[in-house]
Image (spheres, rainbow, N blue to C red):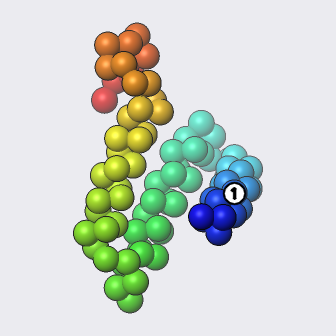
């Protein structure tokens, strides 16, 4: 688990660098970096059949729920949930 934590910590640092490097993109820099990371991560996992497709798809679906909770909180009736438009 320590190795995973180390990788995630380093990736966080790299994400910070990417956001700075692509700041000229403007307000969309975060979304641009997120899209690029997800897209490239899918390629990385799929190349050479290193990652099982079902494991990748399951993990991505779990991250959708995780992202939803981060954006809206735990309570689907909260004001935060109503303020965001899908």
Determine whether, in the image, residue 10 is placed left or right of residue 68: right
Can the viewer see residue 21? no
Q: Residues within 10 Å of mark 1 (few under 14, many from 20)?
A: few
Choose between 47 and 31: the one closer to the eye: 47
Q: What's the residue at 41%, 32% (across, down)?
A: 69
Can the viewer see residue 71? yes
Q: What's the residue at 29%, 62% (across, down)?
A: 57
Q: Residue furthest bottom?
A: 48
Judging from the image, what secondary structure is the residue with disc 1 in? helix
- With respect to residue 26, does 83 lie above or below? above
Q: Residue furthest front?
A: 1
Q: Residue 74, position in %: x, y?
A: 40, 24
Q: What's the residue at 31%, 77% (across, down)?
A: 52
Determine whether, in the image, residue 48 is placed left or right of residue 18: left
Q: Which residue is mark 1?
A: 9
Which quadrant of the view contains residue 27? Answer: top right
Choose between 23 and 73: the one closer to the eye: 73
Determine whether, in the image, residue 17 is placed left or right of residue 49: right
**Quadrant of the image containing the N terminus:** bottom right
- With respect to residue 9, does 80 lie above or below? above
Choose between 33 and 65: the one closer to the eye: 65
Q: Residue 86, position in %: x, y?
A: 31, 29
Which quadrant of the view contains residue 81? Answer: top left
Q: Residue 31, position in %: x, y?
A: 51, 45
- With respect to residue 2, does 72 lie above or below? above
């Amino acid at each position: 688990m320590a190795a995973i934590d180390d990788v995630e910590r380093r990736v966080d640092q790299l994400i910070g660098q990417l956001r700075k490097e692509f700041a000229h993109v403007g307000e969309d820099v975060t979304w641009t970096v997120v899209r690029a990371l997800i897209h490239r991560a899918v390629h990385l996992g799929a190349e050479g059949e290193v990652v099982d497709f079902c494991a990748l798809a399951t993990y991505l679906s779990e991250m959708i729920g995780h992202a939803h909770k981060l954006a809206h909180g735990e309570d689907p009736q909260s004001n935060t949930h109503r303020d965001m438009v899908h």
